[in-house]
Structures are given as structure tokens and as C-alpha cells.
Image (cartoon, rainbow, N blue to C red):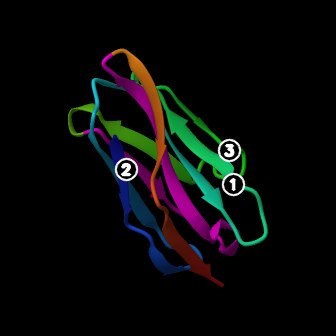
Amino acid sequence: QVRLVESGGGLVQAGGSLRLSCAASGSINRINDMGWYRQAPGKQRELVAVITSGGRSDYADSVKGRFTISRDNARNTVYLQMNSLKPEDTAVYYCNADGQWLSKPWVYWGRGTQVTVSS
């Protein structure tokens, strides 16, 4: 069992910044990719950013240049620095990670953290 706990969401004005954190704990030998997804009301969940264990990252076009994903492998933690926030960034942000425990692969999701950007 792996637990992903997100923190750092909240209410911010357009143009502001927030930093999300997600810490993984539990049955972990290795974590491969860690990522952030978001889901706005009435919309499908979408990928925001992902980062490999080696530090290679990829972003949705809508957040490129504004969001930065990073991770601390020693702490099994992934971060999402969000700058120049827009009202359309309002959503529940979910942490995702995949890895291994005793050679068995796993994929887990966090419960999500609300980000609200006011205009």
C-alpha cells in the first residue's frame, strides 16, 4: 500500500502563485514517474506535468512557461510550482505516482487538493 498526500492548494488571485507538494509513503522500493493531473468541474482529468526519476519533465501546453515540476527522490516528494495563475487553472489537482514494491509494479493517486484562481 502506498499513500500519496497532497498539500498547498488554496485560493489565489489571477497572476499569483502557489506551490503544491505531494509526499509518497508506504510500500516503496522504487518510484518511477511522478506527476500532477487536474480536473475542473464538468471536464475530464488531464495531465498537467510529469517528471521521471531521472528528472526529465514534460508539461501540458497550457501550463508551459508558467508551471515547474520538481522532485526530491530522497523524500519521495514531488512539487508543482505554479506561477502566473489564471482562472482557467481552477481545478482539483491530483498527484500520481508509479513504482515498485518487491518487484511488483503499482500506481497510486492522491485524494486531490483544490486550487481556485479568482479573476
Residue matched to label 1: 45
Cα–Cα span, label 2 and label 3: 22 Å
Circle nearer the N terminus (2, 3):
2
Horizontal and vertical percent position of residue 48:
61, 48
Residue sitting nearer the eye, 95 or 61: 95
Horizontal and vertical percent position of residue 23:
31, 49
Q: Do callouts 1 and 3 mark residues in contact (Cβ within 8 Å)? A: no
Identity of the amino acid at label 1? Arg
Residue at point 41% right, 59% down? 20
Identity of the amino acid at label 2? Leu
Q: Quadrant of the N terminus?
A: top left
Horizontal and vertical percent position of residue 8:
38, 67
Number of the label disc, if any, that sits on residue 81: none
Q: Element type at marker 2? A: strand
In-image side of 108 versus 90 (left or right): left
Residue matched to label 2: 4
Number of the label disc, if any, that sits on residue 60: 3
Q: Quadrant of the C terminus?
A: bottom right
